[in-house]
Image (cartoon, helix red, strand yellow):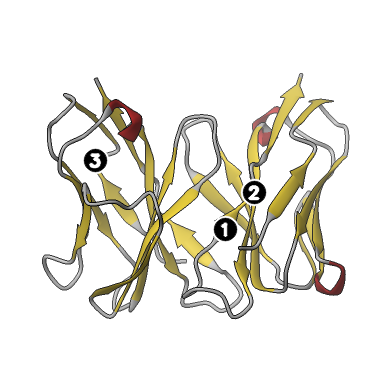
Amino acid sequence: EPEVTQTPSHQVTQMGQEVILRCVPISNHLYFYWYRQILGQKVEFLVSFYNNEISEKSEIFDDQFSVERPDGSNFTLKIRSTKLEDSAMYFCANPSRDRDYGYTFGSGTRLTVV
Amino acid sequence: GIQVEQSPPDLILQEGANSTLRCNFSDSVNNLQWFHQNPWGQLINLFYIPSGTKQNGRLSATTVATERYSLLYISSSQTTDSGVYFCAVVNYGGSQGNLIFGKGTKLSVKP
């Protein structure tokens, strides 16, 4: 099964700073998702991206967040001015090409805001 | 929106024991997956099982879509099975296929 790769694996940032999280999804896939998991809690949907546009976003995805596709293969999640409560694990995901496999998640970026 | 409830929230087993984890969901689904979150935080896809039964080694899963539940069976548990197990669903006809996660079952397997 193809992999979804994320960088960095861990990032520590000062409160108020901008961070950019990166993901390389399964190639040539139109659907793409970002999820967040605060430590010890469940995984929550942030935003979905279809054919180069945001198709849906959750209440969590406020004006501090943005998602872009700077080139044909990479996706980024940007948090403009980080808050302490943004500390979490951030995952990107694709539906797999194999219909019997479901969604493939990246290995995640652990963001720590200090 | 669809609700996903997992039970039990916590489970402690002795190595070698068997266990059953349950996932109830409140509406029809066209995707259901079981994930294992390892100590490094990675989400490992165990099963894609919107209906029926699948087996992979010591793990198996069954989803009864008409009754809106899924079960994950772990046999002969090992310490490496420890971690959090999540059930996640996509609501049938729901919004662009967003996975909705349950709160997970935290499994601890003692040697």
The residue identified by callout 3 is A8
Indicate the chain on which mark 1 is placed. B
Measured along the vertical axis of the image, is residue A111 above or below residue B51?
Answer: above
Percent coordinates x, y for residue B72 in the rendering = 78, 52
Measured along the vertical axis of the image, is residue B4 above or below residue B1?
Answer: above
What's under tag 2, amino acid-wise? Gly
Q: Could you tell me which residue is drawn at 36 percent across and 59 percent down? A: A4
Judge by depth and name the residue closer to the eye, A46 or A5: A46
Q: Quadrant of residue A19?
A: top left
Indicate the chain on which mark 2 is placed. B
Measured along the vertical axis of the image, is residue A79 above or below residue B4?
Answer: above
Q: CA distance from mark 1 to mark 2?
A: 7 Å
- Nearest to the eye among marks 2 and 3: give it: 2
Q: Quadrant of residue B30?
A: bottom right
The residue identified by callout 2 is B102
Using the rendered image, report if marks 1 and 2 lie on a common chain.
yes
What's under tag 3, amino acid-wise? Pro
Q: Could you tell me which residue is drawn at 29 percent across and 26 percent down? A: A84
Q: Secondary structure at mark 1?
A: strand
Q: Quadrant of residue B10?
A: top right
Q: CA distance from mark 1 to mark 3?
A: 25 Å
Side (left or right) of A62 relative to B41: left
The residue identified by callout 1 is B100
